[in-house]
Structure formats: structure tokens, C-alpha cells
Image (cartoon, helix red, strand yellow):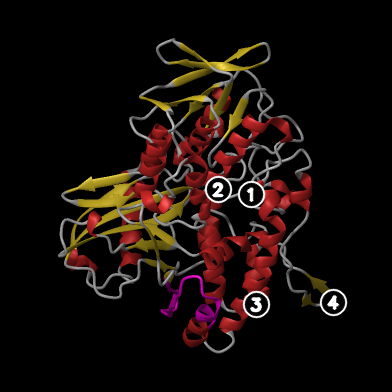
């Protein structure tokens, strides 16, 4: 079989590598850093451990499928998956709180009615029914198949069946997520709940298509999961599966050029000048870096173009004295006090006083991440603009203060319990992933004139493929795993590959 050179050891790259190795290819992964996992990293200090990338998992079936297809040991034999319940506790700007049960429509409806008033739960439940229809319409073409040349069909057709909205003498249907929130949910807190799923990926609800309704639906339908020991354990398990399938890893290997021969990718050149020949090259890197590795355009007019405006993530790691209180939610979402200003900041940062963003507080009940039962590790995170001047100590300090302020709504007595904190700026993400400004890609979405799609896994250079969050079907752990499956299928079966069955 063929020789495969993989650039980057992110989750999408490793998912492709394991599948290609099982198909009989000789696969070598070249990673510029000294470890695997891309953004799925762990920080450790004084017996405390923290996930510095994704902290929770949706659609675990994607990774279950990888382990089924690449060996005898299922995923659950390699990591311990724990369903998070409640899925999340939400603290709204007016002080209202609600804890939403995991993967239970009836439970969510009842919780919202009790917390927000009669009728709120029913409106949210009806919204989920419509979101399911959008999911059913887009799941296969958007997630399980390669991005075909007729991709404008996905871009032009809005799959979310919005409710007709009468305004003055006109009847309209929602085309953006913000319009869905305002016209169909009719409650600022429900609107914040919906829009937080888009903001978590740096999507502006005012411009994100109504099809972004699939993001909360994924959590509702497939549950929210945690990997015992931290999400880094999932990366470890995938890496070890690759090694067992005889994938070779070369760490500390900076790829400087994709070698071409006879009009196709024929290998890679490394920083020391050596060349590794290959029949196919798979790249799990951001678009700017990939373009720099080639001597020709990878996309032409009529192709989906890489997005240039991806935001990034700001994270604060907390080491706390005192045991985690009984019944504490694994995840608390503290909504922004002025939600209208948050998407504006993502799009056009500026000014001396940034608004407090929506902050996610993760408090895993995991002995592996704390020195003993009398301490607790906590991760605070917010999506922020990638171009907000994070090299400035003042900007970092102010953002840290804002996240700590929000965390006070989720953790009682935080200031008295705090031993120390570590800040992870977008610069850390850039160093670990190589992505420009530490940008973090969002999942692909239908409609929106194609602005929310990602470039195809194939490129205009034959033999060169894209995997990972910067390619179809976009960012997030499930989507990265899907991209690996699509790339492997395209290489093994060729252009006739129709997607996973």
C-alpha cells in the first residue's frame, strides 16, 4: 500500500492516521511540538491537573466508531466515559439560575418552567423539535460525506424550519440565530441560553445562520460526556491506538514545504533539509500555515474559502483549597451581564474597557486532577477576539479579573479558597497548535451563503488532503474525528468514496 505523511498530531490527524494504518498504509506523523493532541492538552502543577483545551465531549459515537474500526478494544476499554448530569447550570444576567438535566427533553422542559416561568420550557422544547429537523436535514451532507462540488446547495438552503413571524405587514422567517431567539423563544434568558451555544465557538448570533440550532440539539440528543482523568486521556488513547497500528510519530519535526512531483504532492521537506517521500500528504494545520507550505493556490474561485476571522479562547486555571461541595455542577455557564455587547466585541474589539463575556466554569469531580480530597481544580474559559492585543499585560490582567468576577457566581467563597491561578492566553494556543493568533475553528454550519462552511478535505493539489478543525466539517472534537474518517475514506476508496455508512 501507499506511504502517507501526516503533518500535525492533532485529533483529526491521528483519527486519519489510525484508519489509514489499518487499511495497510505506512503512516508517519510529523509534529512540530514534542507531544500529540493539538489543543487537547493538560497543565499540571503542585498535584493539580487541568484540561487546557476542550473540557467536555459531545457525540462520543464518533470516537467509539474510530476504536471499533481500528482494533478489538472498544473506546470504553481505553478510557472511562462519564455522562455529566446536570449537563450545565446556567446563571443569567438577572440572577436567575437553572440546572438542565443531561439528554432529557422532559427534564429540561420542567426545569425551565420552574426557573423561568410557565411556558418557557414548552417554547424551548418546541425549539428543540425544530432543531432536530435541521439536524436530520444536514447530518449526512454536512458531517458524514465529503464536501462535494455542489456545496452551494448547503449554503443556500436554510434547513431550520423557523416559525413564521408577522412584523408590520410582512411575514418573515428567522434566518439568523438571534432572530430565532427573539421571535421564537421570547425570553431574554432563553435567548441567552440559545446564543451561548454559538458564542462558545466564537460565532456571532446576529450573523450565525438559524441552522446553528443544531449546536444545542447535539448536546440535548447525544448528551454531554467527560473523560475520567481529563480530556487529555482521550488524546492519549487515540495516540496509543495509532502506535498499536504501527503509525510512526516524529516529534519536534518542523515541516517547511510540501514536495511536489508531476503535479501532485509527493512528500514533505523538514527543517533540517531532509525530504520524506510519500504517495499522499495529510495536513492538520491552519490555513495560513498550509498555504505557506505549498507553491500554489489550494482553492480556486467557486471553492469554499478558509475563514480568516476565527476567534480564540482565554483560560484561567484555579487551584482551590477546600473540598468541592456536594452537588456542585460540573459545568456552570455564567452569562454576560450585557449580552448585546459580547458579539460586538468578538467581531470588532476595541476600547479600554472590554465587556465581561459569557464564562464557562468547569469543576470536574475527578481525584486524578487534585492533590487530595481537600483541594479542587477549576477551569474558567471565555471565547475572545484573536486580535485584542493579548501581548499587553493590561489586557491579560483585565480579562483575568473579568473571568474571576464571573466565577464568583459559580463558586461560593472563591477569593478565600484561591491558592493560585495560571493564565492561558491565546499565545499559548498559538504555540501549541501553530494556529495564527491561537485561533480556534468553529463547526461547519449550513446556510449563511457558505460563510460557515470549511474547505473540502481534498485540495486542488492532487495527493494533498486536509484534516482537523480547519477543514470540512469544522472544529470541535466530534467534527475533528469525522474529518479523519473522511480523509481516510477518500484515500482508501478514492473519489468514489460517498461517506461513512
Q: Nearer the viewer, residue 475 or 406?
A: 475
The x, y position of residue 328, in whole percent, is 31, 72
| Residue shown at the point (49%, 55%) measured from the top left | 60
Label 1 close to label 4 by CB (< 8 Å): no
Is the residue 182 above or below the residue 388 in the image?
Answer: below
Give the structural element (helix, strand or loop) at label 4: loop
Q: Mark 3, mark 1: which one is toward the viewer?
A: 1
Q: Tag 3's secondary structure?
A: helix
Depth-wise, is mark 3 or mark 4 nearer the camera?
A: 3
Left or right: 44 as drawn, with respect to 195? left
Reading the image, the residue beneath label 2 is 479
In this picture, which residue range is highlighted in magenta? 89-109
> How far apart are the alpha carbons under marks 3 and 4?
26 Å
Answer whether labels 2 and 1 touch (C-beta < 8 Å). Answer: yes
Cα gap from disc 3 to disc 1, whole angstroms: 24 Å
Vertically, is 274 above or below 395?
above
Q: Do the numbered discs 3 and 2 sit on residues whose CB atoms are within 8 Å?
A: no
The stretch drawn in magenta includes residue 98: yes
Label 3 sits on residue: 126
Among the two numbered marks 4 and 2 on one chain, the one whose residue lies closer to the N terminus: 4
> Residue beneath label 1, please?
143
Say whether residue 219 is left or right of residue 444.
left
Q: Which mark is residue 169?
A: 4
Residue 441 seen by the camera: no
Say which label, 3 or 2, has the lower sequence index: 3
Q: Which mark is residue 452?
A: none
Name the foreground residue: 102 vs 490: 490
Secondary element type, mark 1: helix
Amino acid at each position: 500500500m501507499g506511504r502517507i505523511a501526516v503533518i500535525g498530531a492533532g485529533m483529526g490527524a491521528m483519527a486519519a492516521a489510525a484508519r489509514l494504518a489499518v487499511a495497510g498504509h505506512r503512516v508517519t506523523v510529523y509534529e512540530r511540538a514534542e507531544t500529540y493532541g493539538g489543543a487537547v492538552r493538560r497543565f499540571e502543577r503542585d498535584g493539580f491537573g487541568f484540561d487546557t483545551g476542550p473540557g467536555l465531549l459531545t457525540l462520543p459515537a464518533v470516537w467509539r466508531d474510530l476504536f471499533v474500526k481500528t482494533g478489538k478494544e472498544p473506546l470504553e476499554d481505553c478510557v472511562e466515559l462519564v455522562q455529566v448530569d446536570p449537563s450545565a447550570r446556567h446563571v443569567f444576567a438577572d440572577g436567575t439560575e437553572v440546572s438542565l438535566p443531561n439528554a432529557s427533553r422532559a427534564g429540561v422542559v420542567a426545569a425551565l418552567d420552574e426557573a423561568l416561568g410557565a411556558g418557557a420550557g414548552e417554547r424551548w422544547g418546541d425549539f428543540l423539535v425544530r432543531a432536530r429537523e435541521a439536524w436530520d436535514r444536514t447530518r449526512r451532507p454536512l458531517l458524514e460525506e465529503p464536501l462535494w462540488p455542489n456545496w452551494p446547495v448547503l449554503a443556500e438552503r436554510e434547513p431550520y424550519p423557523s416559525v413564521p413571524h408577522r412584523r408590520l405587514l410582512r411575514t418573515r422567517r428567522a434566518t439568523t440565530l438571534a432572530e430565532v431567539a427573539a421571535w421564537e423563544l421570547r425570553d431574554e434568558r432563553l435567548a441567552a441560553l440559545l446564543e451561548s451555544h454559538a458564542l462558545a465557538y466564537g460565532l456571532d448570533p446576529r450573523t450565525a445562520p438559524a441552522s446553528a440550532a443544531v449546536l444545542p440539539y447535539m448536546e440535548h440528543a447525544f448528551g454531554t460526556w467527560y473523560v475520567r482523568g481529563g480530556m487529555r486521556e482521550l488524546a492519549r488513547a487515540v495516540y496509543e491506538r495509532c502506535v498499536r497500528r504501527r503509525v510512526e510519530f516524529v516529534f519536534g519535526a518542523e515541516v517547511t514545504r510540501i514536495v511536489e512531483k508531476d503535479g501532485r504532492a509527493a512528500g514533505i521537506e523538514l527543517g533540517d533539509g531532509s525530504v520524506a517521500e510519500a504517495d499522499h500528504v495529510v495536513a492538520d494545520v491552519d490555513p495560513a500555515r498550509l498555504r505557506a507550505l505549498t507553491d500554489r493556490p489550494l482553492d480556486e474561485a467557486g471553492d469554499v474559502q478558509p475563514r480568516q476571522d476565527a476567534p480564540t479562547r482565554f483560560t484561567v486555571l484555579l487551584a482551590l483549597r477546600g473540598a468541592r461541595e456536594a452537588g456542585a455542577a460540573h459545568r456552570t455557564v455564567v452569562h454576560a451581564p450585557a449580552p448585546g455587547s459580547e458579539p460586538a466585541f468578538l467581531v470588532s474589539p476595541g476600547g479600554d474597557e472590554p465587556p465581561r463575556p459569557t464564562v464557562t466554569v468547569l469543576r470536574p469531580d475527578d481525584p486524578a486532577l487534585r492533590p487530595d480530597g481537600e483541594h479542587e481544580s477549576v477551569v474558567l474559559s471565555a471565547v475572545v477576539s484573536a486580535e485584542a492585543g493579548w501581548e499587553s499585560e493590561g489586557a491579560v490582567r483585565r480579562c483575568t479579573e473579568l473571568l474571576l468576577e464571573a466565577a464568583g457566581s459559580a463558586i461560593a467563597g472563591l477569593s478565600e479558597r484561591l491558592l493560585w491561578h495560571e493564565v492561558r492566553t491565546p499565545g499559548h494556543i498559538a504555540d501549541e497548535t501553530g494556529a495564527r493568533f491561537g485561533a480556534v475553528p468553529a463547526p461547519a454550519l449550513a446556510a449563511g451563503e457558505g460563510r460557515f462552511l470549511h474547505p473540502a478535505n481534498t485540495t486542488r493539489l492532487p495527493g494533498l488532503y486536509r484534516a482537523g478543525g480547519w477543514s470540512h466539517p469544522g472544529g470541535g472534537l466530534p467534527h475533528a474525528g469525522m474529518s479523519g474518517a473522511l480523509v481516510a475514506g477518500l484515500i482508501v476508496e478514492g473519489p468514489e468514496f460517498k461517506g461513512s455508512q
